[in-house]
Amino acid sequence: DLAYFWEVPGATYGDIYQNMRFTSVAGYNCTLYTAYVAVYPAAFTGTPDMEVLVWDDDGFGYPGTLRGSVTIPYASLPTGLAYVAADLTSLNLVYSDGAEYHIGVNCPNSGAGNVLAILSDDGTSATGRGSFYIPSYAGWYSWTGDYAFTMAVDFCAGDIPYSDCYDREYNCAPYYIWNLPDAYGDDYFNMRFSVGGPETLMTIGLAFYDAGDQSGDVDIFVWGSDAGFPDLTNVLYQTTVAYADIVYYPDYVTLDLSAENIVPRSDFHIGWSPNDVTGGLAYGISDDGSCGTLRSSEYYGGSWGTMLGDWGADVNFLIKAHLCKDEFSNCMTFENVCNLAAYTTLPSGIPDGSGNNVLAIYEGYDSWGVGCRLETVYLALYDLGVATMYTENSEVRVYNSDGLTWNGLPGAPGTLLGSVTLTPADYAFYPAMTVADIASQNIRFDDRIWVGIYSLATDPAYGVAILADDATCGGPGAALWWDDETSSFSIRNRYIDIDVCCTPPPEITCTPGEDWPTTGHDFRRTGHSFNSTGDARCKQDILWWVNDAAGLNSNRPVIYGDILVVAFNTKLVAYDINTGAVLWTISGMPTIGSAFRNTPTVADGYVYFGGGNIPAFNKADVNTGALVWSRTITTTPLTGNTQYTTSVILGNGIYFTTVDGKLQGLDLATGADLPGYPVQLNGVGEETISSNGVDVLYVGTDGTLGAGGYGSLYAIDAATGTINWQLDEADLAGHDLDNDTLGTVTKEVFRGPIAYDQDDPALYVMSSFASEVAGAPVGVRYRIAPDGTIKWAVNGVWQGTTSTANGYQAPILDANNVIYQQLRYWTSETGGVQALDKLKGKLQWTGDMFYTETSYIEGAMSCEPIARDILYAGNNNGNFMAKNCDNGVTEFGYQYYVGSGKSYRSTGIAIDPTHVVFTNRNGDVYVMSEQV
């Protein structure tokens, strides 16, 4: 609360530079744009100018180095209570990853008797961020009342690119000093640092305290890590800093290690000790232990111990590292094995019928990102108790795939990419793993590789044995390499793990200001808005809501400017999105019948919509609801009803499907059939229609009009209606993923919208089918190239039955993942939301949906420039949730008003620059906005 004004300079102490400390957002580069200072002109004296200054933090919470200032002349200052905006863009100031800075105010012409006055709160906010400077004492001070000056700053936060360098330190504010040597014999104060993958250590910095009696040189070390403590056998760097070169806090002793090529891939330690030759005394600095995570340690009594264990305080020393991320900075460990049950000797002791022996075993691994590098191989070798075994060398070898197929999987080992030799001294026996560092081979890959061990022994009695699972774990199985240089396959996976590091995938750039004019946000059905929903967890609330007794089903709301259009079961209603006022309503024959499961499309001031259970399609003015043209039963009716009319606009045409299995193409201006249309399909397209956003339409069907009832996927040239390609039952993957006899037919159907990724061109689509063995209905999730080639297909949980129109979810496209909402057929099944890696279809995370199956309609994703993107999704039990798109965790949620006999499934969602709209089958429409 505003409570006091403060003169600058102060009348009592002559204090100047009243300022506030700000903290940049962790994980982002923050460019300063504008500073705001609340002034109180009624208390001005004379004609004061106002200088706004920016300082770095000095490490103690006070201003340090002055970075720049701007001056606002008196003539430009307000005459009443107001904020003054100071443009900081000319200073080009960027603060990154939590770095602190200060915004301050001075009166530069105070020598002429001029005095400014700024405002503060009442001192109860307890921010600890305000300070001021007294020239006569040449020092910075803070008021005991902890007043917060009324200042603010605008900044633009951008992601720190993976190739950027960054500072890593773990300490809070400085608090304690620690001397070495001490009375207890402690030594080697140090901090443990963690990296997520290969990163180059560029510089290190250590803070020492000037106590006045320090002396002697200081030794500084960088060690590898051994069980969380420094590994004295792995000294990565060591140097002696002469006493004369030691600087004291707030400065750091900084060492440039860029020429040392120190590239840690896991934890390392930075520490110090007085030099053993010169002796002497030095003082390190730590925080108070309030933010410790067991990273500090010392050497005492012949062994390592944590500072918490030895001193009872989990302090962090003021030690920092400057690191540069490697090109391949996203790292993971992969293994295919599960239930250990057997072993294989190499070379094999039992030849095949041709007298050949197995010399090598290889496991297949796919890349999990764009551009990957193999780092380390781990092998579980088994000790058979035979003294002669493990006395000869082996090789860890890596091959690419030969490009052929085996049982539908990418084929056998092909070209040798690299190898390292294991000597008898390198072997370790399970449960320890034999480790082969293969990073030096610089093996880069985008597709499958085969990694394994090749025995150089000629007699099994001198070879090795590697553990295997019980053949129930799935995966690619192992490739067996025979001494006649042929390969075969085993369904057992061998215990071979690998560390892989990949190039971080790109992020989506947010460009706010757009509407949500159609199903899935756009005609590619990405489900991803470029609008931020701001501080939704803290500030989002109901702006207005309404219930319409007509109810709605699988309809999604659309937004065009300030107009919200909602399709209920028997009518189309437009609302003022800011007030909830009804702008117009369209209902009744011959325009709209019942069972109106349409999602309208809005473009260029017009709204397009079907007719429900009648063969109609319409165009109306979105501002007034006045019809422009109609294809109805009284004019030029369509051949089939438009119950599920989701539409796509490309060029001068609008395209949709009808329940008689036709793809319709109408002229936007007149409603007349376009040349080449309608196109007959083998079933009802329902809500599947999508496009590449340019010239190709994609449609899936339920197969009800074709022989056998098998659904299909179509790619159709929008300009001519020509079918570019068609995937039928034999082309699809359901017959291989339905848990029955391999290759038998499966009736897959497609009901939900198809999503198209334009950045890495591919289609993402879900199917449903009734399993031909005991079990719940399931489905397939696909990634399909624009030419119709299936890139991957994986099993998915039920998306709706093959006999009833239930599941209409579309995949939602994030930068790196494709997100699916899945239904629960039985209560024992996993419902919720799942994210798959777009490139490989690998599961990235699963998000719970609060004890019930999810909605029959997909959610909607926001684009957050600072926080993580939010997935808004509903379930069938009256819940509406916001999920972190990085991990699937529910950040916050809402509960609808719940009444008996009400249905809450089919939660349609839309996002615009200032609103989130969600609807449900009960006929509720909720409009949320950021509010104070």
Image (cartoon, helix red, strand yellow):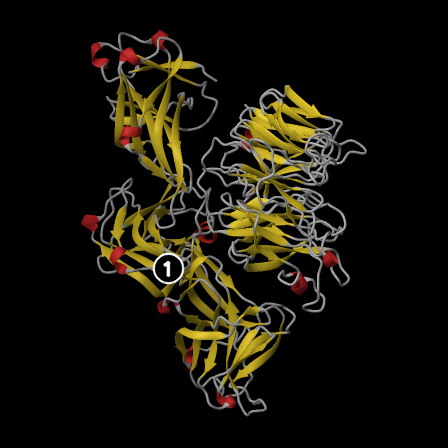
Is residue 397 toward the left or the right of residue 135 in the image?
right
- Give percent across and percent down for residue 88: 31, 27
Residue at image location 63% in from the left, 61% down from the top: 733
> How many neighbours does mark 1 have within 10 angstroms: few (below 14), some (14-19), or many (20 or more)?
many
Furthest residue to the left?
Answer: 244
User: Residue 149 is drawn in which quadrant?
Assistant: top left
Which amino acid is tagged 1?
A: Pro
Local SS, label 1: loop
- Left or right of 699: which side holds 208? left
Residue 681, image x and y in percent? Answer: 66, 50
Q: Determine whether 923 is above or below 508 in the image.
A: above
Q: Residue 111: percent from the left, percent from the top? A: 21, 13
Q: Nearer the viewer, residue 603 or 867?
A: 603
Question: What number of labels is visible?
Answer: 1
Position of the C terminus by quadrant: top right
Taking depth in this image into account, of 404 and 312 the one nearest to the observer is 404
Q: Judge whether residue 521 can be spotted in this image.
A: no
Q: Is residue 911 visible?
A: yes
- Name the residue located 30 percent from the left edge and 48 percent from the top edge: 205
Q: Which residue is at 48% across, 47% downward? A: 758
Query: Going 76% across and 52% down the picture, which residue do you hit?
Result: 826
**Which residue has dot 1 on it?**
264
Residue in front for this viewpoint, 602 or 182? 602
Quadrant of residue 416 in the image?
bottom left
Report x, y in % for residue 211.
27, 42
Q: Quadrant of residue 59?
A: top left
Q: Nearer the viewer, residue 157 or 505?
A: 505
